[in-house]
Image (tube, grey):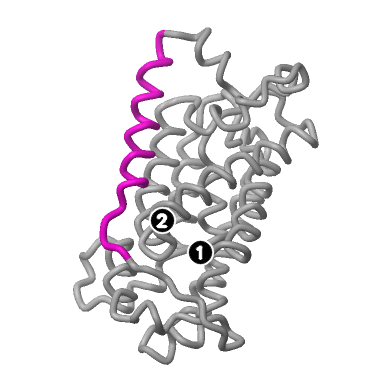
């Protein structure tokens, strides 16, 4: 899920980038070096919290293994760019991999996953890549590469399933559903561990959760604006899939 194939307007791109940045803006207070990239700020701040200290809000043990590297995020970014370059001159391949409701009805279910690697144009690719670059390393650090990959894939598929079920976007592509799933999974992580993180010196977690909700709300509003090609149901399905995954496996 993501968006249709019409060009993305400048206003749409700028607002979407603002929304994704806003979701992580409150975490800037953790860093003494304001110029540090936001994803690195969050990571270095929370690395100070021992994995054994992270628990559910009800006190039950829920260990996390924190890691500094983000190989899956880097691989996904490379795959997005590579796939975009490959399909630029191969329209038939693009149409063979895109999420097509008609093709899905004929049993071509691989499109639920393959369409997450495609993008309609350079602006679409830039927005999703910038969002993944900001969000991915933080989530991967706390979920681990295996669970992060599963979260990303499951969210992308869930977004496409909901979009297909409601039939609102006959042909769509993009990683937006998967990225919204990362937001959902990260929100569950923060909510589940808020008390422990705050006890260890983390600040503004409630504000960050509010910003995550605002991000989703603004994107939903953007998707309803005249002329928008955003697939709101794909975004919603991805977010719900991420929330469910975070609650069960995060």
Q: Is residue 62 left or right of residue 42?
A: right
Q: Residue at x 31, y 43 (%)?
A: 74
Relative to 39, say whether 150 is above or below: above
Residue at the right extreme?
166
- Give yes or no for contact between labels 2 and 1 (Cβ–Cβ under 8 Å): yes
Residue 91 falls within the magenta-colored stretch = no
Q: Quadrant of residue 216?
A: bottom right
Q: Is residue 31 left or right of residue 247?
A: left
Query: Residue 55's mark?
Result: none
Picture coordinates of residue 179, whole percent (x, y): 51, 48
Residue 85 falls within the magenta-colored stretch = yes
The answer to which of 59 and 161 lies nearer the viewer is: 59
Q: In this view, does 233 lie to the left or right of 179?
A: right
Picture coordinates of residue 43, whole percent (x, y): 31, 68
Considering the whole magenta stretch, tell me its main secondary structure.
Answer: helix
Relative to 161, say whether 41 is above or below: below
For the N terminus, the quadrant is top right
Picture coordinates of residue 159, whole percent (x, y): 65, 42
Q: Mark 1 points at which residue?
A: 186
Q: Classify mark 2: residues with Cα within 10 Å, few (<14), some (14-19) or many (20+).
A: many
The answer to which of 219 and 31 lies nearer the viewer is: 31
Residue at the bottom extreme?
199
Q: Residue at x 36, y 62 (%)?
A: 141
Q: In which quarter of the image is residue 42?
A: bottom left
Q: State the CA–CA distance, disc 2 to disc 1.
A: 9 Å
- Sequence-first tag of 2 and 1: 2
* Residue stretch rendered in magenta on the structure: 67-89
Q: In this view, does 166 lie to the left or right of 116?
A: right
The answer to which of 203 and 108 lies nearer the viewer is: 108
Q: Name the residue under label 2.
A: 135
Q: Which residue is drawn at 30% across and 47% down?
A: 71
């Amino acid at each position: 899920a993501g968006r249709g194939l019409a060009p993305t307007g400048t206003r749409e791109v700028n607002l979407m980038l603002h929304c994704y940045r806003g979701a992580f803006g409150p975490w800037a207070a953790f860093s003494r070096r304001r110029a540090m990239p936001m994803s690195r700020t969050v990571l270095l701040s929370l690395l100070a919290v021992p994995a054994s200290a992270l628990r559910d809000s009800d006190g039950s043990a829920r260990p996390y293994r924190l890691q500094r590297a983000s190989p899956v995020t880097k691989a996904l970014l490379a795959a997005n760019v590579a796939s975009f370059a490959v399909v630029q001159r191969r329209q038939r391949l693009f149409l063979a991999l895109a999420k097509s409701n008609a093709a899905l009805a004929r049993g071509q279910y691989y499109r639920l996953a393959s369409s997450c690697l495609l993008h309609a144009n350079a602006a679409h690719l830039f927005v999703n890549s910038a969002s993944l670059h900001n969000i991915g390393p933080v989530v991967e650090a706390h979920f681990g590469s295996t669970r992060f990959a599963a979260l990303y894939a499951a969210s992308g598929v869930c977004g496409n399933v909901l979009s297909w079920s409601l039939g609102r976007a006959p042909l769509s592509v993009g990683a937006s559903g998967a990225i919204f799933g990362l937001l959902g999974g990260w929100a569950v992580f923060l909510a589940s561990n808020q008390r422990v993180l705050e006890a260890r010196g983390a600040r503004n977690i409630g504000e960050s959760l509010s910003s995550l909700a605002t991000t989703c709300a603004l994107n939903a509003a953007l998707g309803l604006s005249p002329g928008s090609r955003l697939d709101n149901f794909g975004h919603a399905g991805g977010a719900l899939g991420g929330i469910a995954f975070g609650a069960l496996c995060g």
